[in-house]
Image (cartoon, rainbow, N blue to C red):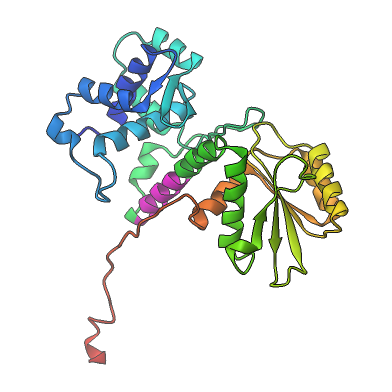
């Protein structure tokens, strides 16, 4: 039989995670779901068209994404899944097998909920398009929606990953990104200077060969919002270097006061976690991508009058 669609993985994964309240490696949840769904060893060998992942693991991952968006599960660290208190309450309220309607709700009604790991960030959940509306979309519309969904999911996973690397490696990631964006003639023009006594400067970019024009970088791998005091301290560090260009990059976000201060001095650019991962995806830093070929009739070829 064909491997079940990802929505069929939602319930077995959630019920398995309920038996592991302290959390479990994702690979064990993959196998538990496969066993529950009767997926054979031969079916486990089936790969996506890209050839880079087993189909059942991919569908288990998407099922867990839906559980996270519904607030029933979480991923405290990469490759580690853990049921939430809401998830445990959900299991208690649904001791018997979920109905098709309940599965559809989990699979479709939370897809537009943005997942953030920033504890003090406020997100307003919105309802996704209904199944009926999706069924009336053209294949191109569905493809655009699917690509956007993939990008959003990758952005979340990337932000989670970047937020857990060491401060030193995070600084290197930031410099790699800025170089890929065109700052600095060579990678050696981007220097990491972070560490004790760095004066609030983590990196320096020389925009010209002689180093006459420089951009100073502060890269903070934070969980909480960055406030005005931190941005103001960076401004003071720039003044100490007699610099007129600075970029403050964080994995979290900025308070309104911090944003207003940066605008008032006109020499600091703020990049929050969401913008950071968007740029990393666009410039393929820590990201790989593949080309999808979409067939389309070549009307010029069939224009007999032009022959």
**Chain part drawn in magenta:** 140-151
* Residue closest to the far front: 196
User: Considering the image in quadrants, where does the C terminus appear?
Assistant: bottom left
What residue is shown at x 71% (from left), y 34% (from top)?
A: 225
Residue 206 image-quadrant placement? bottom right
Q: Position of residue 209 (x, y in %)?
A: 69, 72
What residue is shown at x 43% (from left), y 44% (from top)?
A: 149
What residue is shown at x 70% (from left), y 71% (from top)?
A: 208
Q: Position of residue 82 (x, y in %)?
A: 44, 20
Q: Position of residue 170 (x, y in %)?
A: 59, 44
Tell me, yes or no, whether the highlighted magenta stretch contains residue 257. Answer: no
Q: Does 249 sit left or right of 51 as displayed?
A: right
Q: Does 206 sit left or right of 19 as displayed?
A: right
Residue 290 in view in this figure: yes
Residue 101 in view in this figure: no
User: Considering the image in quadrants, where does the N terminus appear?
Assistant: top left
In the foreground, 98 or 252: 252
Q: Does 178 sit left or right of 292 as displayed?
A: right
Tell me, yes or no, whether the highlighted magenta stretch contains residue 143. Answer: yes
Q: Position of residue 297 (x, y in %)?
A: 26, 71
Q: Does 106 sit left or right of 206 as displayed?
A: left
In the foreground, 169 or 137: 169
Residue 59 image-quadrant placement? top left
């Amino acid at each position: 039989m064909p491997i079940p669609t990802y929505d069929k993985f939602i319930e077995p994964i959630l019920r398995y995670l309920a038996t592991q309240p302290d959390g479990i490696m994702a690979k064990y949840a993959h196998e538990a779901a496969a066993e529950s769904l009767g997926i054979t060893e031969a079916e486990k060998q089936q790969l996506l068209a890209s050839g880079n992942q087993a189909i059942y693991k991919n569908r288990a991952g998407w099922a867990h994404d839906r559980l996270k968006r519904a607030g029933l599960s979480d991923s405290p660290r990469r490759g580690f899944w853990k049921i939430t208190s809401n998830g445990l309450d959900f299991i208690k309220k649904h001791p018997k097998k979920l109905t098709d309607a309940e599965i559809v709700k989990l699979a479709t009604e939370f897809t537009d909920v943005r997942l953030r790991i920033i504890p003090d960030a406020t997100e307003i959940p919105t309802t996704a398009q209904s199944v009926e509306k999706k069924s009336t979309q053209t294949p191109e519309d569905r493809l655009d929606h699917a690509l956007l969904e993939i990008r959003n999911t990758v952005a979340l996973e990337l932000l989670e990953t970047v937020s857990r690397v060491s401060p030193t490696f995070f600084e290197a990631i930031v410099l790699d990104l800025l170089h890929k964006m065109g700052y600095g003639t060579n990678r050696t023009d981007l220097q990491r200077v972070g560490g004790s006594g760095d004066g609030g400067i983590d990196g320096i970019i020389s925009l010209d060969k002689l180093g006459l024009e420089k951009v100073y970088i502060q890269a903070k791998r934070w969980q909480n919002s960055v406030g005005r005091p931190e941005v103001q301290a960076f401004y003071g560090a720039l003044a100490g270097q007699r610099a007129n260009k600075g970029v403050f990059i964080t994995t979290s976000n900025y308070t309104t006061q911090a944003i207003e201060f940066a605008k008032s001095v006109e020499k600091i650019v703020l990049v929050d976690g969401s913008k950071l991962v968007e740029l990393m995806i666009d410039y393929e830093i820590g990201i790989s991508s593949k080309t999808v070929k979409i067939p389309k009739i070549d009307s010029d070829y069939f224009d007999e009058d032009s022959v």
